[in-house]
Amino acid sequence: MSATVDTIPAIGRGFRLQWEAAQDCHVLLYPEGMVKLNQSAGEILKRCDGERDVAGIVTDLEQAFGANGLERDVLAFLDMAHQQKWVQW
């Protein structure tokens, strides 16, 4: 099932998002290892708190970074992250 603006994403079971100062980036930790995230992925995932919907996440990102038109990119990333089980809804 693909994400929509009404989807409420949360970090997937078994994963933990944290800032890794040594790597200067957000990482997703899981029992078998770690996924190093680029800045965009980290910013999206840190807003996936199980309370905000995608529309709210997009609005927050657009305000934080002075950008417009991020909805399509955020939805595409969340669909990929959902396939990897990084997020659930």
Image (cartoon, rainbow, N blue to C red):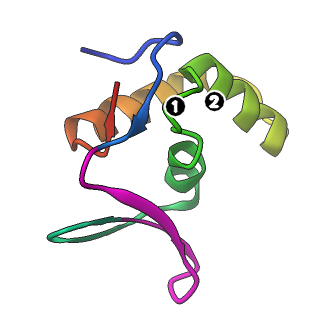
Neighbourhood count class around disc 1 (C-alpha, 10 Å): few under 14, some 14–19, many 20 upward: many
Q: Is residue 60 above or below residue 13?
A: above
Write down the quadrant of residue 11 in the picture.
Answer: top left
Q: Residue at x 23, y 42 (%)?
A: 85
For the residue labelled by badge 1, is the local secondary structure a helix, a strand or a loop?
helix
x, y percentage for residue 29?
Answer: 32, 67
Labels 2 and 1 touching (C-beta < 8 A): yes
Q: Quadrant of the N terminus?
A: top left
Q: Secondary structure at mark 2?
A: helix
Q: What segment carries the magenta color?
A: 13-28
Give the residue type that dot 1 points to.
Answer: Val
Q: Which residue is mark 2?
A: 57
Q: Is residue 54 magenta?
A: no
- Specify whether 49 is left or right of 79: right
The answer to which image quadrant residue 36 occupies is bottom left
Q: Nearer the viewer, mark 2 or mark 1?
A: 2
In percent of width and height, residue 82 lies at: 28, 34
